[in-house]
């Protein structure tokens, strides 16, 4: 897995260890938040998918009903009814507006339909087929409403799908790259600090041993000097100098030159 043996290039100090621990805490919190965000987006994604399936099924029924109603109008009122309707309509009464909905920090586009103005084709088909014309209009209005809803769901579906992919990539990056790298860096810094601590401890032990041996040597020298001074005092009381006796003994150790008769 990527990031198992990798680490950041840092100086192993206590300060850097604290920085790495803080970064690990931030990465852990970020991973948890992104994981929750991914779960929330996934739930919303599945709900949108169900709504899209239902809307598509309704769309098929609505389009079939509206097409059949248009066929009835043409049969009853004649083929020229289309031109009559177009002449009476100057501006669309059913309009669409867009808005944004915030889902876990992701802005999803939404489309809403609304009616504006009055219908100007009340007298269309007055001679014949007026009822079928109104029924056809109602059927197509319902079909447009379902179509707008389906367009809103499809757009939100695509936006949500892209947001889920991006969030999952970030979650995987934090889980498999960033956090292991920081953890490896923390382990490296701890190991280096422990090694430095062991070296300092060994150095202190060596220094203490040297100081102890030096104190013992000085104490031994002082003891030997004190004993020598005591002996010198005793010998002086007896009229014999220890140093003189030592010089005689040292001189007697030297051999005289051979005498040839």
Image: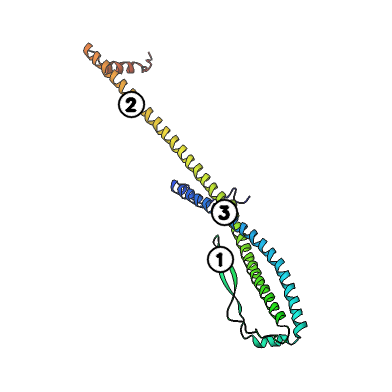
- At a point 70% along the width and 69% down the height, the residue shown is 59
Q: Whole-percent x and y of residue 236?
A: 22, 14
226 left or right of 116 in image:
left
Give the mark nearest the N terminus, 1 or 2: 1
In the depicted structure, whether residue 163 falls above or below residue 141: above
Most distant residue in the top direction: 238
- At a point 33% along the width and 18% down the height, the residue shown is 250
Identify the image's colour scheme: rainbow, by chain, secondary structure or one colour.
rainbow
In the depicted structure, whether residue 34 falls above or below residue 71: above
Q: Is residue 97 visible?
A: yes
Q: Residues within 10 Å of mark 3 (few under 14, many from 20)?
A: few
Select label 2 or label 3 by which is in front: 3
Q: Residues within 10 Å of mark 1 (few under 14, many from 20)?
A: few
Q: Secondary structure at mark 3?
A: helix
Give the mark nearest the N terminus, 1 or 3: 3
Q: Secondary structure at mark 1?
A: strand
Please name the residue that numbered disc 3 is placed on: 36
Please name the residue that numbered disc 1 is placed on: 101
Cα gap from disc 1 to disc 3, whole angstroms:
19 Å
In the depicted structure, whether residue 85 falls above or below residue 208: below
Select label 1 or label 3 by which is in front: 1
In the depicted structure, whether residue 146 falls above or below residue 213: below
In this rendered view, identify the residue nearer to me: 128 or 208.
128
């Amino acid at each position: 897995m990527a990031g198992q043996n990798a680490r950041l290039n840092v100086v192993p100090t206590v300060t850097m260890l604290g920085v790495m621990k803080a970064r690990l805490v931030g990465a852990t919190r970020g991973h948890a938040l992104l994981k929750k965000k991914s779960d929330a987006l996934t739930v919303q994604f599945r709900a949108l998918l169900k709504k899209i399936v239902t809307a598509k099924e309704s769309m098929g029924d609505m389009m079939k009903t509206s097409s059949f109603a248009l066929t009835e109008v043409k049969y009853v009122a004649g083929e020229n009814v289309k031109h009559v309707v177009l002449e009476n309509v100057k501006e669309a009464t059913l309009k669409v507006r867009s808005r944004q909905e915030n889902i876990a920090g992701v802005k999803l586009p939404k489309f809403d339909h609304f009616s504006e103005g009055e219908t100007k084709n009340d007298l269309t088909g007055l001679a014949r087929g007026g009822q079928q014309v109104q029924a056809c209009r109602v059927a197509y209005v319902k079909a447009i409403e379902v179509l707008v809803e389906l367009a809103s769901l499809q757009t939100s579906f695509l936006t949500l799908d892209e947001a889920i992919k991006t969030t999952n990539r970030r979650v995987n990056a934090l889980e498999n790259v960033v956090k292991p790298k920081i953890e490896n860096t923390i382990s490296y810094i701890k190991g280096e600090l422990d090694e430095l601590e062991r070296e300092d401890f060994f150095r202190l032990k060596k220094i203490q041993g040297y100081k102890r041996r030096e104190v013992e040597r000085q104490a031994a020298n002082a003891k030997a000097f004190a004993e020598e001074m005591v002996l010198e005092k005793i010998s002086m009381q007896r009229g014999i100098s220890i140093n003189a006796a030592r010089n005689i003994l040292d001189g007697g150790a030297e051999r005289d030159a051979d005498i040839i008769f």
